[in-house]
Image (tube, helix red, strand yellow):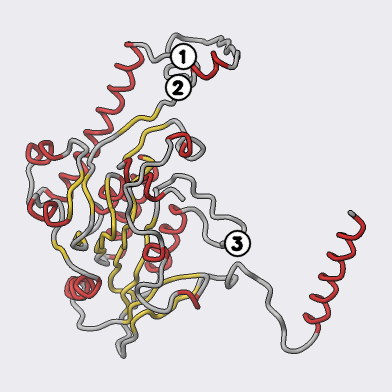
């Protein structure tokens, strides 16, 4: 059987080699082009460009791009596009399109700071356009932008921090597994999944979460200080989410609209009348218009609750800026 399969494989390879040697050349690279390319989504006679960058899916969570994609993880994808835009004198503005329930606190903070660094270095305005959901870490990232716009049906907010400390004590006991721990200090195994969380450990992690939460509040206040006081922010920053109109009423966002509205606004912010709308991609054929992106092709927001154990492979122990129902909806 192995021999037969081997013959089939050899035959297939031989056919590929024969056709590859002939003209026209057959390109078998399923990964797209070897280098990232600029594609025009909305054409204009102007030289100026508005770049659309998509931030789609949980931030920093379960982001193995797979063997058939040239893109790296979300952080490197955003970083590279900002870097490439900073090197193009014709790029006059960026629309950062967000469709994310948030995710890891560290990754959210790094992306936020990369946006700030990009604006400081280039002076190019960045507009956040929220899609189905832009909550918690998604809102955190949006705070790095100069203007925040949401679609009429967007879910946003969820300002807060959550520590995830899975526990498997009962499961281990049922299957007869004992965990022996030798440690250098009493807090070295704090939050270990093989034991119950003690009162002291709970207080320890609560202090950590509170500290990061205050950092989150400072990020929001830095972005909204002309509209909201810190006390006003604290009143609504208890983890709850808001639909777009409510978020606008609460002054968490600047406007409600669609892509055309976002384009008009970024053109105004860049002090230009017209521009080509572009994107950077390894798969030019897939980027044929402003809606041909992963954020729109994904399933619509759903509050379907999937078993928590399905999330365990991707939700490692850590600190998150995340809206949980959104995480379940984005989990494939």
Q: Earlier in the sequence, mark 3 or mark 2?
A: 3
The answer to which image quadrant residue 325 occupies is top left
Q: Earlier in the sequence, mark 1 or mark 2?
A: 2
The location of residue 147, given as percent across then percent down, is 19, 61
Query: Callout 1: 10 Å neighbours few (<14), some, many (20+)?
Result: some
* Disc number placed over residue 167 in the picture, else none: 2
Query: Tag 3, which secondary structure?
Result: loop
The answer to which image quadrant residue 298 occupies is bottom left
The location of residue 100, given as percent across then percent down, is 34, 52
118 or 183, which is in the foreground?
183
Q: CA distance from mark 1 to mark 2?
A: 7 Å
Mark 3 in CB contact with mark 2 (< 8 angstroms): no
157 or 95, which is in the foreground?
157
Query: Tag 1, which secondary structure?
Result: loop
Point 42% across, 19% down: residue: 191
The location of residue 261, given as percent across then percent down, is 19, 72
* Disc number placed over residue 68 in the picture, else none: 3
According to the picture, the residue beneath numbered tag 1 turns out to be: 195
């Amino acid at each position: 059987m192995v021999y037969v399969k081997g013959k089939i494989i050899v035959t297939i390879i031989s056919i590929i080699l024969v056709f590859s040697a002939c003209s026209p050349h057959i390109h078998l690279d399923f990964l797209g082009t070897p280098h990232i390319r600029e594609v025009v989504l909305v054409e204009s006679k102007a030289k100026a460009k508005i770049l659309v960058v998509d931030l789609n899916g949980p931030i920093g969570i379960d982001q193995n791009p797979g063997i058939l994609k040239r893109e790296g993880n979300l952080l490197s994808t955003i970083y590279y596009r900002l870097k490439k835009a900073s090197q193009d004198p014709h790029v006059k503005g960026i629309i950062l399109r967000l469709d994310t329930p948030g995710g890891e606190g560290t990754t959210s903070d790094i992306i936020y700071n990369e946006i700030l660094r990009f604006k400081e270095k280039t002076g190019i305005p960045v507009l956040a356009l929220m899609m189905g959901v832009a909550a918690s870490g998604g809102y955190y990232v949006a705070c790095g932008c100069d203007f925040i716009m949401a679609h009429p049906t967007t879910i946003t907010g969820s300002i807060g921090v959550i520590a995830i400390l899975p526990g498997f004590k009962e499961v281990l006991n049922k299957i007869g597994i004992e965990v022996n721990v030798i440690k250098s200090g009493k807090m070295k195994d704090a939050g270990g999944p093989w034991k119950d969380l003690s009162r002291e450990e709970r207080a320890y992690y609560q202090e950590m979460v509170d500290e990061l939460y205050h950092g989150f509040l400072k990020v929001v206040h830095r972005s909204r200080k002309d509209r909201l006081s810190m006390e006003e922010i604290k009143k609504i920053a208890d983890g709850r989410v808001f639909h777009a109109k409510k978020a606008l009423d609460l002054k968490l966002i600047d406007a409600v609209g669609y892509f055309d509205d976002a384009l008009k606004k970024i053109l105004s912010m860049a002090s230009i009348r017209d521009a080509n709308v572009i994107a950077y991609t390894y798969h030019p054929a897939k980027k044929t218009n402003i809606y041909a992106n992963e954020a729109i092709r994904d399933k619509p927001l759903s509050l379907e609750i999937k078993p928590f154990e399905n999330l365990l492979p991707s939700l490692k122990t850590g600190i998150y800026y995340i809206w949980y129902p959104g995480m379940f909806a984005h989990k494939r």
